[in-house]
Each structure stands twice: as C-alpha cells, then as structure tokens.
Image (spheres, rainbow, N blue to C red):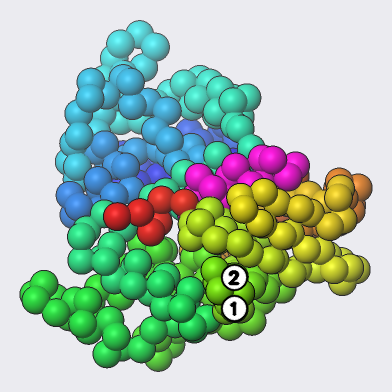
Amino acid sequence: MNLEILHVPDCPNLAPMLQRLAEVTDLPVTTRLIETDADAARYGMAGSPTLLIDGTDPFAADNGGCGCGVSCRLYRDETGRIVPAPSIDQLRAAITTADSRTAPGEVLSAWRTRAVPLDPVEKAVHQAILRAFVAAGVAPSGPDLDEVVAGSGRITADVLSALHDADAIRLNADGQVAVAYPFSADPTRHRVHIADPDGGGVDVYAMCAIDALGIAPMLGRDTRIESVDVTTGQPITVTTRNGRTTWRPEQAVVFIGADAGGGPSADCCCDYLNLFPDYAAAKAWTANHPSVAGQILNQADAEDLATRLFQPLLAS
C-alpha cells in the first residue's frame, strides 16, 4: 500500500497527520511538497495536508467537493469537531477499507495515471518522444523536439523538465531522454519487436513486463516480447498477433511490486515488474524478497492492466 501526504510549505497540520499515521501503521509514509495550484490539481491535493492511499483521497467525500488547492485543509472527527487531521480511528478505518478493496494493479494504475501530461504542449512532446522510439527504437534528438515546441512560447528543455518532474519521462544527467514509459533508451531484460504491416519492424526495450505488454495495445500493432525469468534466466515470450496473445511458457505470470522507499517508477518499481514462467516461480521470488510488496497477476489481469495504462497515450 502506498501512503503519501501532500502538503504546502510549513504546514502546521502535517506533523499531527504523520504522528497519527505512525500510531496506526508501520507502512512507510512519503510526503510531497506542493507549492502551486497546478501541482495541487496534478497530484490531487484538496488542501494541506491531503492523505493519498494508493493514489486516492479516502476523505474526499467529507471535503464538500472543495478543490482547495494550496490552501489549508481541516477535517471533522467522529463527533463533528473541526480537527487538523483525521483521528487515529478514522485513519485506521481508511487504511483497512483501502486494503480490502485493492484490485490487481490499481496502485500502479493510479500512479501512472497521475503522470499522464495534461498540458497540450507537454502532451505533444511526450507523444513525439513515444513515436520516435516506435520509428527508430531510440529517443529523439533535441532538434526533433524543438519543432514540436516551436510557437508555444516555451523551450524544449523546460518542457522536458516538466515531463521529468511528473514522471512521464526520465532524463539522464546530460538532459537527454533515458526513459519514456513504456520505452527505455538503454537495454533491459524486456526486448520487444514491433512489427510493420510490410513484414519489417523495429526492436525496442521496455522498462518492465507491464510496459512491454502495453506496447501492442498502445500502437495497435503486432509485437513479440522476449524476456527472462529474473531468477533462472529461463526465456519467456509473449507474442501478440491480430490482438491475440500467446504466452510461452503457457503458465507464465507477471509480478508487479515496488520498493517501499518511493520515488519515480523507473527507480522504485520497474525492476520489480517481471515475467515468471509460472506462479510457483513468482511466489518463490516474493518469498525471497519480503521487502518488495506486490501482486502476482495472471495473464488476463496483466494484459488488462497494460492496456489501461498505455492504450490512451497516443490517442489524439
């Protein structure tokens, strides 16, 4: 479960929220500083502090539909008193409820959905980066993106920085595109062949198993994923042809999980979203990595999650 508190600078009610959560759960809690209304809307802060459980505000219904932005937020306890943070019992109930209804992949889905660019210029640049990977298997150059940004009043470097901050892409130390989910500019254990209608195609690398599965629905094209069992190195392939997938081995599954430390997807979860030849192999891996919380998805759930995450990215 991912617990995150969104807050403004010097929020006096952040400490009470953190203290009460510490009495309720030993799960790690991350904090995110919000300084603008735009960021408040992007990350879902309805006033400071806002608790997100797996990306969802459990107290949204009690906020009267207030957008609130970067203003202070107050709560009501069980007796109706105005308080700086939900009570211990209210927080415990919210966490218990969220834990009981978490569907496969919902945490990852909420996480990645928040990273989808909404600004028209940022969306155009993001889609141009994705199309460059599809066309050539590599990230685009700066001049290619300058053409997309031209006339917007912004410069390419600033747009790329905004996409990086939102975790839609990741930039390397030189400011070049290293990751544009689902694609990686560097080799990974997930290689994907994207077929052309004429029989050709291009090879790309995906950041993780779910990213690899999302390429076919994102493009509406045939793909062949070549991956390996992270423990044994056993080859695992997933072939998509005319919208239908074939998995080898037939019992293959996907594990999705994340490091409890939090951070960008590329750093804290992509390395843990892998294909395994069967459920037993995935279960054995999770037993040996108790610090990596996650879920084992069957093929149908993994394909559905990948489609939900990536099919909309290149929509007009």
Q: Nearer the viewer, residue 15 or 241?
A: 241
The kind of residue on which mark 2 rests is Ala
In-image side of 254 versus 13 (left or right): right
Residue ID at (30%, 30%): 84
The quadrant the C terminus occupies is bottom left
The total of numbered circles placed on residues is 2
On screen, 251 above or below 13? below
**Residue closer to the observer: 305 or 49:** 305
Q: Which region of the structure is painted magenta?
A: 297-310
Residue 14 horizontal/vertical position (percent): 35, 43
Find residue 309 and report its horizontal and vertical position in percent.
Answer: 49, 50
Q: Position of residue 160 (x, y in %)?
A: 30, 75
Q: SS class of the residue under badge 1?
A: loop
Q: Which residue is mark 1?
A: 200
Image point 86% across, 50% down: which residue? 250
What secondary structure is marked by label 2? strand
Task: Kindly indicate the quadrant of the structure image that contains residue 125.
Answer: bottom left
Per the image, the residue denoted by label 2 is 195
In the picture, residue 171 is in which quadrant? bottom left
User: Which callout, 1 or 2, points at the residue further toward the start of the chain?
Assistant: 2
